Amino acid sequence: MAGKRKLVAQHRNRNPKLGIKKTKSNKNSFKRPSNSTVIQRTSDKKPIQTRKKRGFGIDGGGGGASAEQRLEELETEGVDLAEEEEESEYGSKDENEGNAVEEEADEDDDDDNVGELEDQSEDEVEDPTDARIASGGLAGTCPDPFKEHLEHVLVDDEIARLEKGEAKFSTKFAAAGIGGGSWVSTKSSAPPQEKNLSSCSVKKRLATPWREAHKESVWGDFESEQQCQFFSLCNSYQDILHSRKLANRGDGVVDHEDLSITDAYILHILNHLTKSRDLVTKNNEKIHNASSGSSSSQTLLDPPRDQGFTRPKVLVLLPYRSSALKFVDRLLTLVPALQKANVEHKARFYDDFGAADEEDEEGVDIPRKDPKAGKPADFRALFSGNNDDHFRIGIKFTRKGVKLYSEFYASDLIIASPIGLVTRIGEAETEKAKEIDFLSSIEIAVVDHADIILMQNWSHVVTVFEHLNKIPVEQHGTDFMRIREWYLNGQARHYRQTIILTAFSDAGVNAVFHRSCVNHSGKVKTRCHYEGVLNRVVLQVRQVYEKLDCNSITNLDDIRFEFFTKEVFPRIKNSLQGGYLLFAPSYFDFVRLRNFLKSQNASFALLGEYTKQSDISRARSWFYHGERKILLYTERAHFFHRYKIRGIKDIIFYSLPEHANYYVELLNMLDGNEAAPSCTVIFSRFDNMQLERIVGTTRAKKMLSSPNRLFMFM
């Protein structure tokens, strides 16, 4: 133990950033459990020589048995390396969160199989992925991306470039499955697309369930070229922004997600977690042999660097419990059979995350009219399940199963909604016991359905990313001698891969991707070509687009408001007809317009996301019967309710909607009995993303570059 204390002292001197005080609590946190092993150093700092035992060679030479076979031998002899690994890697477990919002952890956390994702005997010695982890690559194959990404050593100049965001998207290649679309990357070339999982450095025990779930694959082991390409991008560990994660129904309408993309990134997550745990397992075996006096030519100068500050490696942000349910369903489909057959708390999970049936007081189901009947297909698909947006849950993978509702510090994967994590972050700021160190070692962060989260509150995503990969407040029993150097040096954010999936591009999403994603492995994003949605407008509507003269985005809101008050509103005020629908995508614009209309004593009604149901019914009735001249309507209200509004004679888009299909839906609500229904659209060059989704990429470029201010479509 004296040798270990000496190593810890030396390590503290090498890493003054940690600021670890020599208190009693800190001292105790470095203690190993009694059944763990320690690599000791002699006084002259010569490494201990290990010798071979039972034919097992640490260096893999001399025809020694594999680490998996050695683990089986030790388990039959009563040596529980899995339990030892769990303690030596992450120390003792913290108490349950005790939070009403957080899904409670199960108190029985003494699974003696913790520490391995699957029975090691399933991966035989000929598994090529294991060989890559050990050697960095095989003859005739590419090196393992996992090893290359995590073992890359950053230099000061490289860090400076990453912080400044100087990398340019200079490489362009076709995006499979996206008509007219392409990928643009900061790397010099596109990653190789391997059709077979064995060539993608995927663990063999993950390849088997994948092939069972994708029996109709037509592109090697993948369903399509698109899925193969997306997995290759994930496997390259680049940051990814996929802004077209939708599938086409065949009639030009895109309204449901592409599950093949979801499967691809889930496979990548499982592969990353499996390799991380296998690496720790093998290094634990080396330490065990070194301390037990096994014979080998291998020398251990220092403990292996193979861990982070805490156990959770993957964070997945999702908007609703229903989307979390779909994610976990796919996750359990792609895990090995042994784990799939042993899922703890599965029934509880489906109760908490599934759609609740309405019952009367006696517990009898009440048949009710479906409120979603008559709504668009994408609305029914999105809101058909549990729409609670406040949740967080940990998932732990053990050698023989999957444990849902695991305590965060014992979890490998955390699934949460942005607001669910922000609530936890807020608690940490007010209560010392509620720290958020479980976010310190996230190596893969996924934001799925970003377009839906935009309609909730995107600022919560920004807050979460601001708290990722920070130096932890507490030690949590971590063995600092095995933490990777780049964690200790505060460089973890440069090794975190971020995957953002959305149905369309948005300025807020782009800001997070460009400012918060500084991965040393580079970035790649989609660049889409849109045909527009004007051909889906059923009625013959006179559509007038008026371009604002604005050169600075900081002045855009004021210029837009001034244009409306001086150019558009006087036309409404002087008109004898009513039926004006004033559409405001932003709630801040909604409030500003409401205050202006009040100041002008205008005849108007409100329909926003925070409007009471009784007021909504009254406003719709007033507008339909002509008792109110203007109806002020927000995009979020339309997103959450998809109201069918009657009595519309003219539409004014204060700004273009994010969802192009909303433009079509609203225009198709116009009163067809009117002689010349019309709409007015106010736009600027900063609305280029919304504009191209509605009028098409080609038309949008012409409109933005043209000196003309007025454009008309019929």
Image (spheres, grey):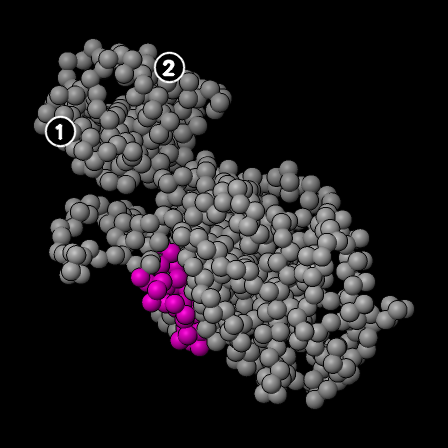
Q: Which residue is mark 2?
A: 562
Q: Amino acid at mark 1?
A: Ser
Q: Quadrant of the N terminus?
A: bottom right
Q: Quadrant of residue 264?
A: bottom left
The residue shown at (29%, 39%) is 639
Position of residue 267 relative to residue 179, above or below, is below
Residue at the outermost front position: 24
The residue closer to the viewer here, 194 or 5, is 5
The image shows residue 318 at horizontal and vertical percentages of: 41, 51
Magenta stretch, overall SS: helix
Q: In the rendered structure, which segment of residues is drawn in magenta? A: 323-351
Is-magenta flag for residue 119? Answer: no
The image shows residue 40 at horizontal and vertical percentages of: 79, 71
Q: Residues within 10 Å of mark 2 (few under 14, many from 20)?
A: few
Q: Quadrant of residue 354?
A: bottom left
**Element type where label 2 sits in the image:** helix
Contact (Cβ within 8 Å) of mark 2 with mark 1: no
Q: Which residue is mark 1?
A: 621
Horizontal side of residue 7 vs 589, given as left or right = right
The residue shown at (44%, 53%) is 99
Is-magenta flag for residue 344? Answer: yes
Residue at the outermost right position: 44
- Front tag of 2 and 1: 1
The residue closer to the viewer here, 511 or 15, is 15
The residue shown at (14%, 25%) is 622
Q: Amino acid at mark 2?
A: Glu
The image shows residue 455 at horizontal and vertical percentages of: 36, 39
The image shows residue 327 at horizontal and vertical percentages of: 39, 59
Horizontal side of residue 542 vs 159, given as left or right = left
